[in-house]
Image (spheres, rainbow, N blue to C red):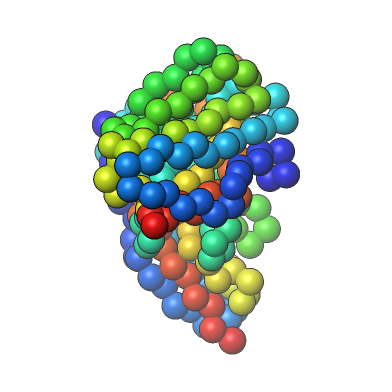
Amino acid sequence: DGGITQSPKYLFRKEGQNVTLSCEQNLNHDAMYWYRQDPGQGLRLIYYSQIVNDFQKGDIAEGYSVSREKKESFPLTVTSAQKNPTAFYLCASSILGDSGNQPQHFGDGTRLSIL
Amino acid sequence: GENVEQHPSTLSVQEGDSAVIKCTYSDSASNYFPWYKQELGKRPQLIIDIRSNVGEKKDQRIAVTLNKTAKHFSLHITETQPEDSAVYFCAADSWGKLQFGAGTQVVVTP
């Protein structure tokens, strides 16, 4: 979806280095999500946020951190504590509907590799 | 938490035939089930979704069925075309979070 922008497209991390992946959306969506995708596998939830200044851990939050200072932005930091960071990282967003869960729409992803 | 299993992991079909992918889920509270298509190196794209108050939903050549009692749902693609070749993921929403299946690689051969 053109409304969700992830950058950079490719990122290389050195040992002991923290790196930050950017995710911006102009869809006015309340909720934002970060997923990790390993080759041949499904998507695993790292963190999600339903409102500014609040976020919750997903299934694999260890070694990652996030912030949600603005509705439009949800950056993900991969810290040096994440020992196996090589993966495809996907950001998604959705509205929060009164009538139930709403579809999540994804950005183009960031491919992170270890140098 | 929710656990979603997806079968088969790979599916090869002749162009024009039908393809069926099946998923099971564990959390009876799950009430929203989307399906995503992902082409190599690209973003997952929503192709169809179904809520727990509906048993079946159709959109042109794609249909999804849901059996709440058995806790399984399926994706049906009819009259497959080469552009249907991709990885398909099912997902179940549990307490506001999506749990994804491992994916099915669909290959449509001319």
Using residue A6 as the reference point, say whether residue B56 is left or right of it: left
A80 over B103 or under it: above or below: above
Q: Quick one: which residue is furthest to the bottom in this view?
A: B110
Position of the C terminus of chain A by quadrant = bottom left
Q: Is residue A81 visible?
A: yes
A64, A49: nearer the viewer: A64
Measuring 59% from the left and 47% from the top, which residue is drawn there? A8
Number of marks in the rendered image: 0
Q: Residue furthest top?
A: A53
Q: In the visual, does B56 lie left or right of A84?
A: right
- On the image, the x and y values in percent for residue A39 come to 38, 61
The spot of residue A68 in percent (x, y) is 53, 20
Residue in front for this viewpoint, A72 or B2: A72
User: What residue lies at 34% left-to-right and 65% top-to-bottom?
Assistant: B8
Placement of the N terminus of chain A among the 4 image quadrants: top right
Residue drawn at x 38%, y 41% as measured from the top left? A17
In front of the other: B108 or A80: A80
- Asked whether residue B52 is in view, the answer is no
Q: Residue at position x 51%, y 51% from top? A: A11
**Position in image of residue A42 (x %, y %):** 39, 52
State the image coordinates of residue A92 (x, y, percent, origin top left): 55, 37
**Residue situated in front as seen by the camera: B45 or B71:** B45
In the rendered view, would you say B100 is above or below A33?
below
